[in-house]
Amino acid sequence: MEAIKTKIEVTEKERLPVVSEREAVFEARDLAVYYGDQRAIDGVNLDIYQRLITAIIGPSGCGKSTFLRTLNRMNDLVPAARLTGQLRYRGIDLYGPGVDAVEVRRRVGMVFQKPNPFHSSIYDNVAYGLRILGMKKDLDERVEKALRAAALWDEVKDRLKDSALGLSGGQQQRLCIARAIAVEPEVVLFDEPASALDPISTSAIEDLMHELKRDYTLVIVTHNMQQAARVADMTAFFGLDVSPDGNRQGVLVEYDETEKIFTNPSDKRTEGYVTGRFG
Amino acid sequence: MDKKSVLERTRGRLDRIGDPALKAITFAAAALAVTVLGLIAFELVRGSRLAFHRFGLGFVTSQTWDAIHNQFGALSLIFGTAVTSILAIAIATPLAIAIALFLTELAPKPVRALLGALVEMLAAIPSVILGLWGILVLGPFVQNQLEPFLNSTLGFLPFFRGPHSGTGILTAILILTIMVVPIVASVTRELFATVPPELREGALALGATRWEMVRGVLLPAARPGIFAAVALGFGRAVGEAMAVLMVIGSQIGIHLSLFAHSDTLAARIAGQYNGSSTNLQTSSLVYLATILLVISLAVNIGAQLLIKPIDRRPRRRRIALDRAFEAQGLSAD
Amino acid sequence: MNEPAFTLKATGRLRRRQLVNQGMGALAAGAALLAVAVLAIVVISVGSRGAGSLNLAFFTQNQAQGFNPKGGGVLFAIVGSVVLVGIATLIALPLGVLVAVYVSELAPPRLARVARMALDISNGIPTIVIGIFVFTILVAAHGQSALAGSIALAIIMLPLIARATEEVLLLVPSSQREASLALGVSRWRTTVQVVIPSALGGILTGTTLAIARVAGETAPLLFLTSLGTSSTADANPLHPLQSLTLVIFSYSDQADPAYQSKAWAAAFTLMCFVLVTSLAAKLALARYRKKLGG
């Protein structure tokens, strides 16, 4: 990873609500995730707040993606993955008995590192989720609304029937965002959404996240600290910890307002990471 | 003169002729492979001339196959081939896709390899063995259980009437289905495996169930390849001679009933192994082989054209696909 | 905390969708189970009928002469099969490798495409058609012989071996080729001394698969080599020889159960050979591909 020697500028944002007014969407309590015998993250205690952008940063291998994928139960797809501790979503135990992962994922959408449009038209990509969920009324309007919200409408409105694979990388990623928000989720997770994109597309995605914040709770995993500083209200720093049994696992080192993390971190490890001295 | 320079000189001489020689020899081999293909077509056309002069294209629309009166026609054989192959591929396709889905999407990892190997073993069983099994094991079951059952439940349809028999169209369809399922399944399985996992995750992350992901994302992404795989399986069914010869009953005639005896192009040719009595009959058999060749060429080339449009994939996937088709005798190029 | 106003459980529409999902999963599992069951039924019924008739005489003796189908064995057919497949391999293996070398190493792209397409089309030709072809060019004039059968089998094997070889040649890292060429080693030496040796494992397993495939072929042999009911062991390829597959076929429609049990025994022998060799070759090929990083 490229070392950053200078202090990172934190973008000016609207005032954050004071702590007592924030409403937690996710509450992680002593959360640990295992892949087989390997512990990937351990002892995570973290609240993610409604209608804010929360960034998760940290060195590679620190379990940031693992943590993100527990939030919409995508880790269920890894056969050997299991979880201890508790993770509540708006008060409900996300891994409690009877909870259906499909319902969780409908409410908690996800945008991936690599744009992954389906092999169908632009329109059908956005309509896919709506169709399976039975939201077939006003399908055209819903598709347009999602494409507008993803700032893609003007670029594609004349070629909705064209294959989505013909779009540029940045457009494909915005299409994937449109696809995710078309089904009206409550949260959207971004797993390094701009790491495969050029700077102009990246900046378009970041602008878009600011727009989406009005309606959605956003969580973004990124290895790009400037990006976290630019978009996030809250930032969680995950670090690597070696336990006495030799297992290397990710732990939550510090979680605070982005400004504080980047300008006045309380943990030495965070300070070392954000000023580029390690990681 | 010391040893080294002798060595170097021979090496130099060898190299001067080596490169063009290798090129010439390998080119000759490749040319031979292409020539054999052309020669097969030429010889078949030449061999069928006599029958063609006598019967013309009317051969294709005539039902008779009468060695005593020297009257030959292919219609009922074409009918038998079409009915057995189309019904076999119609039964086999959904089964094969379902098996491929189970193997790539549902079965636990350790089970996958084992099951996949078992399905491929089914494809490896020689057709003469399936034929033997068809006469002596499957046939009696069809005659005593399956046909009475079909007759009593669906007997109001003309397809399920008539005397029960262990040999006939129904048995041939079942044997062909058994032969075709593993072929289509293993190609389809490779196709599914080449669909990137990110596409699956994309659908699941939207709140799709696994089946909705399969229907909405996996099947559309693999569709052209599946068509090609089905065409390939169909070609195999059309060309299968032995197993069909052993179970179909070798009778000329067009019947609606699936219980009836019938015959196919390939099985009729194979069935005349003990010698035909006249040159005209031999020529008529070669004529049948020519028709068979035309059908198999059309199916094969059609399948290749189906695959072409998706060939903009990265090289790695293309190799995986090539391997899948090649294993079954078809290229993804 | 208040009781949440929503649920993450499957209700209503989602419950229906999950039922469809489970139903489809069950159908897929059922289809896979059916395929395995059919394989098991075929293998068990051939095994149970065939294994009982196997004894030393079956492999070491010829068919008893006269009208006594009991006793004796199928040595003549085993010898015939070995001769037929052996000669076919001797023809197809070198040709197939040469074609593959041309297509993957030397040919201009357009010619390579033509050759590849010809191989794939040949592969799709029904084997009975190949039998008729060899009949018209050889047997019609010179009579039946094992050699004619071998040529038909070689035509079937050639595209299989060529395509398998081409695939492994593609897997040989181009760095190996370039390293050799950069040392000033000529192209043919590079091909013969570097490329083919490192692809040898793949070529041999591909050939083994082709052998397993043609060992079970019957249709192309029907006109080309002998179909009599009695014969003696003979290895002369210019004579019409029998094969295991022809024996299975001709014994299968004999009314005498002694012949039928010989057909089962021959089928069991052939099945074991084909399944074991093709399984072993596939395992070896998978390992080989992994080694070359395919």
Image (tube, coloured by chain):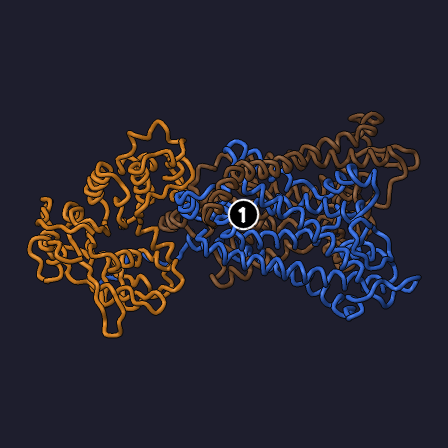
In the rendered image of the structure, the colour used to display chain A is orange
> Which chain is indicated by disc 1?
B
Q: Nearer the viewer, residue A141 or B171?
A: B171
Number of numbered tags placed on the structure image: 1
Give the image location of residue B300, x and y in percent: 62, 37
Q: Nearer the viewer, residue B264 or C71?
A: C71
Q: Residue furthest bottom?
A: A244
Give the image location of residue B119, x and y in percent: 59, 56
Q: Quadrant of residue C76?
A: bottom right
State the residue at coordinates (73%, 56%).
C82
Q: Nearer the viewer, residue B108 or C67?
A: C67
Q: Residue furthest left?
A: A264
Q: Relative to residue B207, is residue A23 drawn left or right?
A: left
**Mark 1 sits on what residue?**
B324
Q: Nearer the viewer, residue B52 or A224?
A: B52
Q: Relative to residue C86, is residue C97 drawn left or right?
A: left
Q: Relative to residue B196, is residue A32 drawn left or right?
A: left
Question: Badge 1 local density, few (<14 within 10 Å), some, or many (20+)?
Answer: many
Give the image location of residue A250, x and y in percent: 24, 63
State the residue at coordinates (85%, 68%).
C71
Q: Relative to residue B268, is residue C27 drawn left or right?
A: left
Relative to A19, say whether B18 is above or below. above
Q: Would residue C40 be seen by someone viewing this image from the given angle?
A: yes
Q: Residue furthest front?
A: B1
Q: Would residue A52 be seen by someone viewing this image from the given angle?
A: no
Q: Secondary structure at mark 1?
A: helix
Q: Amino acid at mark 1?
A: Ala
Chain rendered blue: C
Give the image location of residue A11, x and y in percent: 11, 44
State the residue at coordinates (18%, 57%).
A279
Chain rendered brown: B
Relative to B63, say whether A262 is above or below. below
